[in-house]
Amino acid sequence: MKPAPFRFSRPEAAEEAVDVLRQHGWEAKVVAGGQSLVPLLNMRLTTPSVLVDINRVRDLDRITTTGGWLEFGALVRQRRLEDDPRVVAGCPLLAEAARWIGHPATRNRGTVVGSIVHADPAAELPLLLVTLGGELVARGPGGMRTIPAEELYLTMLTTSLAPDELAVAVRFPLMAPGTLYAFEEFAHRHGDFALVAVAVVLRPGADGRLAEARIGIGGAAEVPYRAREAEGALLASDAVDKAIDEAARLAAEQAQPPDDVHASREYRRHLVRVLTRRALYKALAGVSQDV
Amino acid sequence: MTGVELQSLPDRMEIAVRVNGRTVRRVVEPRLLLGDFLRQEAGVSGTHFGCEHGVCGACTVLVDGVAVRSCLMFAVQADGCDVRTVEGLEGDPVMQALQERFREYHALQCGYCTPGMLISAYELLLRGEARDERSVREGLSGNLCRCTGYSGIVKAVLAAARSGQAVAPPNGERGG
């Protein structure tokens, strides 16, 4: 349970980090919080030759709100999602879901960007990125680019980042005042990876209808995804609260969850239905989870 | 840009880590876990490894004032940092109150999880998050105990919180 040997790079600037990645490609791995990567190293599930520790890279620890986005630099720790007033005010769904991410000690060190790029199918932050429609900001040898959520996740633990690219920030659209939201997760023990998680964001429109409906499902596929048919049912309805059961049914029907040692396909499908229903009721009631 | 070929990157580094107030200077491999550095190089064996992949919490220590899992951090990453283990919090009033309540409420049997449990509980108290049974159970959910069944631990932490020993976060800092 000790890692294989590796060489250590401790750059102090993003360009330096990218240069190491360019030189070593898939043999180099970036470490920031390490809460997802180091377990893999300890179990020798991955044995990179070079570890690029970015904890000393300048200017990556900022939270900023500009141009309608809430942006987190690559070194922003997950703990700040719970505490920072800009998160609570600008994107309250993130603040609410934060207490479900790992445990306090892992949130002290683990980073928002790190969880986003680690791409665990049952992780909360990738689900929230897809649900809210956020984007990743990456720096490579050729310069910067942004990757929208729908282009980021290819399959489990795999993003569209190139081996010589460093994720430097992630941004989420600011949630407009009056947006309804909820987050539901089921795990055997608090802090475990979700068996299924559901995030819901609803924007009320005119005459009791919805202007926008976003239902994100996590843990039920190789990547988090939006339950489009369920969203459609809500948008088509003129009495949204009466469409909840139908939306939950459609979300479960659309799901193709894995069958594994933690839960059967049928159980996960059941969880999709129950959690979607609960999240929609909670969002429409305008009730946040009591922390 | 200076060469970053494999051979020019270090496979051994000199680091200086302040452990319980004392600077420990060593040359180590980058893959040496912080917990192993504390136990073997710094000679503080209160910190235990239970799983070595971040799920059991037995290895939890304070690094620059916040609780972290010492199995998920390399010693080289703690270069220049201030690390506190249970041994280094002797005499701290919050830790003392916790330890007395642990004894009173039978919150330990074999003691293996206890150092990590105490550090996690200590941080809960400092953050004012030990409000009720639910918040304590949630806050300690990252620390596994195979002996006690947790109820003594929960009672001890709540008793410590209510004894008035919980204080505001030091220097107004919170978390990462």
Image (cartoon, coloured by chain):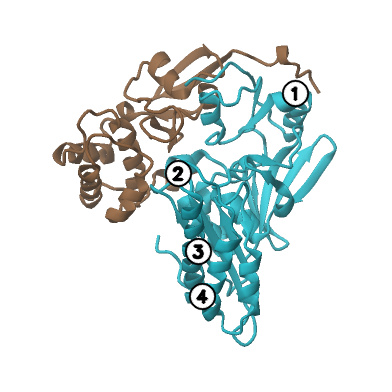
Chain colours: A cyan, B brown
Amino acid at dot 3 = Arg
Mark 2 lies on residue: A262
At 30% from the left and 32% from the top, the residue drawn is B113
User: Of the residues tagged 3 and 4, which is closer to the observer?
Assistant: 3
User: As rendered, which of A239 and A60 lies closer to the eye?
Assistant: A239
Give me the C-alpha separation between circle 3 and circle 1.
Answer: 45 Å
Q: Amino acid at mark 2?
A: His
Q: Gap in Å between the C-alphas at discs 2 and 1?
A: 36 Å
**Earlier along the polypeptide chain: callout 3 or callout 4?**
3
The numbered mark, 3 or 1, whose residue comes first in the sequence reads 1
Q: Are marks 2 and 1 in contact (CB under 8 Å)?
A: no
Q: Position of residue A172 (x, y in %)?
A: 65, 57
Is A163 above or below relative to A291? above
Q: Provide the residue designation for mark 4.
A: A284
Q: Is residue A242 visible?
A: yes
State whether discs 3 and 2 lie on one chain. Answer: yes
**Callouts 2 and 1 in the same chain:** yes
Sooner in the amino-acid sequence: mark 4 or mark 2: 2
Callout 1: residue from which chain?
A
Output the chain of dot 4: A
Q: Which residue is mark 1?
A: A24
Residue where numbered disc 3 is placed: A273
How many marks are shown on the rendered structure? 4
Name which of mark 3 and mark 2 comes first in the sequence: 2
Query: Percent position (x, y) of residue A166?
Result: 72, 37
Element marked by disc 4: helix
Dot 1 amino acid type: His
Q: Earlier in the sequence, mark 2 or mark 1?
A: 1
Callout 3 secondary element: helix
